[in-house]
């Protein structure tokens, strides 16, 4: 099955279609759709993650407040200013067959909570991919930066590792989009936190009390009262394209 067929089959299944009905709609043998529905959906993401890298973008200003190893020369213009320092967006797209890509987005808190939200994988044609990219970065002051996959890995996987050390797990669905980032060496090139210290940026959907309690109950070298930045507005909802 092609990536488009897999996602279409999952959508039909969610709307109550039987394996036989899905097979008829997609013009596939019933045995194929039956086998698909006996597989956990997480395996779909792993298959889509095998595609060739087509695009990798990060929001401008991602490095604000971070300590980055001087040996790594990753792009972030000197005049780039983030509207929300400590928060960044990463978008990775891989080939998903003829004229299609599979795109995954990651919204990350670099100072404390790690991966706050994930989107995808979404199979899109070139026009839809362009629209999706614009919508995903619409809340940022400057256009996104084309970046090497290594930087995306550092920001997403590195921040997730840092957040776990503080007691926070990645957003639900992270395992479904993890594969788009590829294999990571695990080299620690970025020190997360605001200049190396955890700082909580309160979001509109956060359980702020739980976050503060978790931070206060952590390692002794953390601040007794973790800094709290002003709340940030809710992210713009991305409609299906």
Image: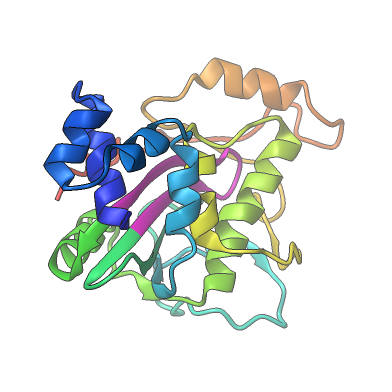
Highlighted range, magenta: 103-122
In the rendered image of this protein, does residue 77 appear above or below residue 142? below
Q: Residue at x 35, y 47 (%)?
A: 120
Magenta span includes 3: no
Residue 96, x across and y down, in percent: 33, 65
Q: Could you say which quadrant of the image residue 138 lies in?
A: bottom left
Q: Residue at x 42, y 57 (%)?
A: 48
Q: Residue at x 70, y 27 (%)?
A: 215
Q: Identify the colour scheme used.
A: rainbow
Question: Does residue 194 appear anywhere in the picture?
Answer: no
Q: Could you say which quadrant of the image residue 69 lies in?
A: bottom right
Residue 74, x across and y down, in percent: 56, 79
The rendered magenta stretch, by its main secondary structure, is classed as: strand
In the rendered image of this protein, does residue 60 appear above or below residue 104? below
Foreground of the two, 62 or 81: 62
Query: Number of numbered discs present?
Result: 0
In the rendered image of this protein, does residue 219 appear above or below residue 85? above
Question: Does residue 154 appear anywhere in the picture?
Answer: yes
Residue 42, x across and y down, in percent: 48, 39
Foreground of the two, 40 or 238: 40
Q: Quadrant of the N terminus?
A: bottom left
Q: Residue at x 58, y 38 (%)?
A: 113
Left or right side of 193 for 209: left
Residue 214, x across and y down, in percent: 68, 22
Left or right side of 174 for 128: left
Query: Among all residues in the image, which is located at the extreme right?
Result: 220
Q: Could you say which quadrant of the image residue 234 lies in?
A: top left
């Amino acid at each position: 099955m092609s990536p488009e067929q897999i996602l279409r089959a999952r959508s039909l299944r969610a709307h109550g279609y039987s394996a036989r009905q899905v097979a008829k709609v997609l013009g596939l043998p019933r045995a194929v759709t039956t086998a698909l529905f006996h597989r956990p959906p997480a395996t779909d993401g792993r298959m889509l993650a095998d595609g060739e890298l087509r695009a990798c973008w990060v929001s401008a200003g991602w490095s604000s407040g971070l300590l980055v190893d001087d040996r790594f020369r990753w792009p972030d213009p000197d005049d780039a200013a983030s509207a929300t320092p400590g928060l960044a967006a990463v978008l990775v797209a891989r080939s998903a067959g003829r004229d299609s890509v599979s795109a995954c987005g990651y919204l990350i808190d670099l100072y404390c909570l790690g991966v706050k939200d994930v989107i995808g994988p979404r199979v899109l044609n070139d026009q839809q991919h362009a629209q999706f990219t614009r919508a995903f970065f619409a809340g940022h002051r400057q256009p996104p930066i084309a970046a090497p996959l290594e930087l995306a890995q550092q920001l997403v996987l590195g921040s997730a590792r840092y957040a776990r050390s503080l007691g926070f797990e990645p957003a639900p669905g992270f395992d479904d989009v993890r594969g788009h980032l590829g294999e990571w060496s695990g080299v620690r090139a970025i020190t997360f936190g605001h200049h190396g210290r955890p700082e909580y940026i309160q979001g509109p959907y956060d359980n702020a009390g739980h976050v503060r309690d978790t931070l206060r109950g952590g390692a002794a070298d953390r601040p007794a009262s973790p800094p709290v930045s002003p709340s940030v507005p809710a992210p713009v909802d991305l409609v299906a394209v």
